[in-house]
Image (cartoon, rainbow, N blue to C red):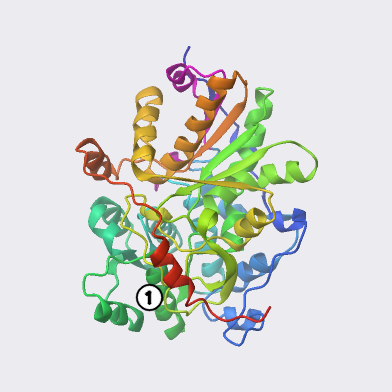
Amino acid sequence: MSDVKIILNESEIPTHWYNVVADMPNPPLPPLGGDGKPVSPEQMLAIFPGPLLEQEMSAERWIPIPEPVREIYRLWRPTPMFRAYRLEQALGTPAKIYYKHEGVSPAGSHKVNTSVPQAYFNKMVGINRLTTETGAGQWGSSISLAGQMFGIEVRVYMVKVSYNQKPFRRSMMQTWGAEVFASPTDMTNAGREALAADPNNPGSLGLAISEAVEEAASRKDTNYSLGSVLNHVCLHQTVIGQEAKKQFAKVNDYPDMVFACCGGGSNFAGAAFPFLADKAAGKQVRLVAAEPSSCPSLTKGVYAYDFGDTSGYTPMMKMHTLGHDFMPPSIHAGGLRYHGGSPLVCQLYHEGLIEAVAVPQIATFEAGVQFARAEGIIPAPESCHAIRACIDEALRCKQSGEKKTLFINLSGHGHFDMASYDKYFAGELTDYDYPAEAVKEALKRLPKVAA
């Protein structure tokens, strides 16, 4: 049986972003400054534009999407959703598996869903220069593209291990006009301190964030742009889940379980949050975040206030954390190498409204190859985590005979990650055990916050 593409008319691209805060049983906890008090909007205006801060702090259920943003969304949205018939047959499962392909965007991942509005709102307030960080390069590529569309200069601090592993992601950013530097660099205090402590430091998202924030805070003409974690980023990504719900309705189906990979949390939030609204209304649906077992912030982190970056430049956020100066292993899913996560995702996990599972590196590539050989699409290493978790559930259905409907958010394609696949085929990848002692040490240095 051939795959069935479920098509939406471009008029069905969402007109509003969905804000999960409106349906959370408890209001989100505020970010705190160094004095332990909630951060004021005035403090945040040093690196973010006013319209994004309004979204960050909003409790309104629906936030209008500006028409100039929807106009650019039309380049790739609505993204297609497929029934994975071939994968179902390969697994011999009675479960139905669907996947939504966010890799059809110009940058190859879901990240452009937020890079475009972030560039737009910065341009609105007269900002013509942005700094940011990137792990595997999907976010760096996306904000570079958006910057080019709105005439904004972009400087990207790319985690060094990914800078070396994924040179073509770097080339994409440069093609769209961005400057790209391997983090840690000698251009910032945070980078110089990290290199002084370890000249071979492989970098981390937390450290790259420190460098980007430090530069943005030191220049009046520059703002900072973040590709995950923050509320407004999760908000922008909800176009994914909203479209998916319409696509399921077209075939009179609905998922029993939703799977998405989770590092900072924006991809998971984008796929899952619109379904969480249904859950709040009494519908039964399980929402599963899949993270790497080598960087298991949700499944093994501590729920506490911590900095979003290594050097402590950002406000403190309540999240599941492995410690802000935890240095994760150099896995090939670079976009998931983050010590913490979205405060919204973490709070919902803490309150038992979503689930999380940690999966090892080799098993994720096994799943990615199996998916590619069945469905034809080569997934990004990050996306392979969600595929692994879904395949495991489909195999459980095979054993039990349950006829569940499973949904994967395929967050991006793996065309620029083939060096990682090469290492998998050569048997050069290894699984990393949970580094309990390293995390234990990092957690000792959590900031002290009054209860």
The quarter of the rendered structure image containing the C terminus is bottom right
**Which residue is nearer to you in this view: 352 or 9?**
352
Q: Which residues are magenta?
A: 79-107
Residue 65 visible in image: no
Seen in the image, is 170 located left or right of residue 350? left
- Report which quarter residue 182 is drawn in: bottom left
Report the residue at 61% width, 88% height from top.
35
Residue 286 on image: x %, y %: 65, 39
Residue 178 on image: x %, y %: 33, 64
- Report which quarter residue 373 is drawn in: top left
**Which residue is nearer to you in this view: 427 or 316?**
427
Toward the top, the furthest residue is: 1
Task: Please determine whether, in this image, residue 198 is positioned above or below residue 86.
Answer: below
**Which residue is nearer to you in this view: 49 or 410?**
410
Q: What amino acid is found at the position of numbered circle 1 in the picture? A: Glu
Report the residue at 67% width, 45% height from top.
274
Q: Which residue is mark 1?
A: 211
Seen in the image, is 90 located left or right of residue 186? right
